[in-house]
Image (tube, rainbow, N blue to C red):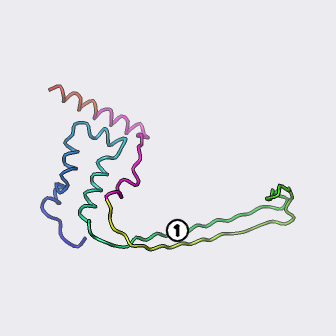
Amino acid sequence: MTRKPTFSQRFGLDNPFLVAWELVPLSFVADYFLPIGRVIAGMGAVSALYGAKGWSKTYMHNRAKVMMPKGTKVLNLWYVDYYLKDELRHSYNIRKFNRARYTPSFSDPLKNLRITLPSSVMKLSTMGALLHQRLLSLRK
């Protein structure tokens, strides 16, 4: 991005849907399990880039080394067992590069959406404490 942020963008008010989501009571609890806030923020970013085109690069590099010592029992496709007479060493090195045209889509933020459970005791206790405080404030 080469243009300077606007006044509303500086204060995070450029995405009204994200502002509305943050105002929903207990929305942070839903964000612990399903990152709805991140999806809404991603869709806001896509809407800011809508109509833009660019390039997408994919680079893959795989390396593997195989070493089988002398005397290793090998099973081949015809189910005939035999033992290696000599040590076998082989290395694989595969590189792949792909470049393609990319146009932002509103489905992009949904591609990596996963339901997760908090994995640490600290996150669970923080979530419980925030939920407890929020529930106490709803009674007033």
Q: Position of residue 132 (x, y in %)?
A: 27, 29
Q: Quadrant of residue 120?
A: top left
Query: Is 57 on the left-hand or right-hand side of 109?
Result: right
Mark 1: secondary structure: strand
Q: Which quarter of the rendering shows the N terminus?
A: bottom left
Q: Position of residue 117 (x, y in %)?
A: 42, 40
Toward the left, the furthest residue is: 7
Check disc 1 and report the residue beneath it. Answer: 60
Q: Which quarter of the rendering shows the C terminus?
A: top left
Please name the residue shown 41% across and 43% down the image.
115
Q: Nearer the viewer, residue 18 or 65?
A: 18
In the image, which residues are magenta?
106-130
Query: Is 7 on the left-hand or right-hand side of 56?
Result: left
Q: Position of residue 95 (x, y in %)?
A: 56, 72
Q: Is residue 4 above or below residue 15?
A: below
Please name the residue shown 31% across and 51% down the image.
38
Q: Quadrant of residue 29?
A: top left
**Mark 1: amino acid:** Met
Q: Nearer the viewer, residue 65 or 13?
A: 13
Asked if residue 101 is among those painted magenta in the image, a careful observer would answer no
Please name the residue shown 19% across and 55% down the image.
12
Query: Is 18 on the left-hand or right-hand side of 65?
Result: left
Please name the residue shown 19% across and 29% down the image.
138
Q: Position of residue 76 (x, y in %)?
A: 80, 59
Circle 1 packing at 10 Å, graded few (<14), some (14-19), many (20+), is few
